[in-house]
Amino acid sequence: MGFADDHLIPLVDEGLGNSAYLLDLGDGRALAMDASRDLRALRAAAERRGLRIAFAADTHLHADFLSGAVQLGHDSGATILASAAGRRAFDHQRLTDGDEVDLGGLTLRALATPGHTDEHLSFLLLDGSGELGVFTGGSLIVNSAARTDLLGQERTEELARAQYRSLKRLTALPDQTAVWPTHGAGSFCSAPPGTERTTTIGAQKQANPLLTAPDEDTFVAQLVASLGTYPAYFDRLGEINRRGPAVLTADPMLPALSAPQVRALIADGGHVVDVRPATDYAAGHIRGALSIPLRDQFATWLGWLLPDTAPLAFITAEDQDLSEIVWQAYKVGYERLAGKLTGGMDAWLADGNPQATTAFLAADRAAGRPYVDVRQEAEFAAGHVPGALHIELGALNESAADAPTGPVVACGHGERAMTAASLLERAGHTDVAVLDGGPADYAAAQDLRLVQGVEDTRA
């Protein structure tokens, strides 16, 4: 058993692709690293060990989630540790390069590692024998480095060059130094697929393709070329984190709404979000509702596709966890949650309201329709149906007019495609169908071979 096995608890958010860390300091206190506003898992882990969170550190002004540091400062008196360059507007210990914090037997040293953001810090954990590990946030991550375009396209290359220098600094640490990143597989802050979320400096020297780049220009070209799209809400959260998210004095709830209240919300410009499984939505839903099935990725698509300024009403299935809806919304800055429709679609219909349906087709029934693929570009390039029109789900609000008449919409399984169909229906499209499955299912049913690349695939 090593130090990390005994003292460090990684807490993975599979939906956002991030890891927070709870560090047991050995004296009944703990440090929380890059905790999100959804503190349920972190608090449960601390309670199991009988720990009080004495420090809450943030590596950077996260764009992909609201920080839980301010809440931890309020609830447990935790000292907040963050970069002085971040100009945070709340009480915290302002750290600059080389500053050290005594954790009681352990030391946390701030390392300036700009690139992902300007004010980014990594935190090197030391004891009397040397370097134990480094919390690298969005700098060095498993087999990559985090994206450098969050501050605007005009600064992408400049920050990529800063990222190059930061990774050079980190890889000067001893090979056995553990690497504990925040961003990992599934994060739109740019991490490659894979199951590993922690690594070592030595392992990254061998496996990280960016670290084998022969020079800075090659590194920059490789990193910039890997950047795909990212959720719209990323552009809002950095400033909210700088000001400090509002402290919550009680767990937020979803109030009960009647069908007339939901109708009034729609009339006043609110949105209805249907979180039921895709099959339930297809069978019957409120016209104009947005389908976002409740799963790990719920927060990502809520934050990408709807504004945070309008009230939201939710349509749920009986067995769904309402607290999961609330916390996924709150961790990405959505607090105008009007409530959930009591009784669901049965109550909506009993009140005399109409419902709409969406065809959910097996692959052998989907032939003859224009095929619209709404996956990310990298997924599409890896293999798609010949002749498919590619429109990423995140771009569909602006590109609905480009969709053909009577399409079958597809992703990898059907959830994102149902979301896409609901957007198309909201935009006025009719006769929209969703593929129950993915491109391989469709190709097999139609005796086709998937093609790779992105050439000649857009309308």
Image (cartoon, grey):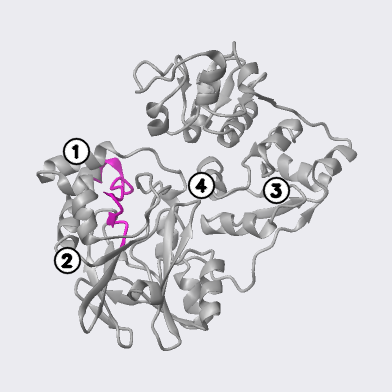
Identify the element where label 4 is drawn. helix
Return the x and y of residue 120 as percentages of the image width and height. Answer: 28, 61
For discs 2 and 3, the disc positioned in front in the rendered view: 2
Q: Which residue occupies the foreground of this view, 347 or 204?
A: 204
Q: Name the residue under label 3.
A: 313
Q: Name the residue under label 2.
A: 173
For discs 4 and 3, the disc positioned in front in the rendered view: 4
Which label is found at residue 221? 1
Does the magenta segment cover residue 140? yes
Mark 2 and mark 3 lie on one chain; the one further toward the N terminus is: 2
Specify the amino acid type for callout 3: Ala
Specify the amino acid type for callout 4: Thr
Q: Which residue occupies the foreground of this view, 197 or 78?
A: 197
Q: Specify the farthest residue to the top.
A: 368
Mark 2 and mark 1 lie on one chain; the one further toward the N terminus is: 2
Identify the element where label 1 is drawn. helix
Does the magenta segment cover residue 447? no
Q: Give neighbour class at mark 2: few <14, some 14-19, many 20+ (Cα, 10 Å).
A: some
Residue range highlighted in magenta: 136-155
Is residue 403 something that shows in the picture? Answer: no
Return the x and y of residue 198 as percentages of the image width and height. Answer: 34, 60
Q: Name the residue under label 4.
A: 300
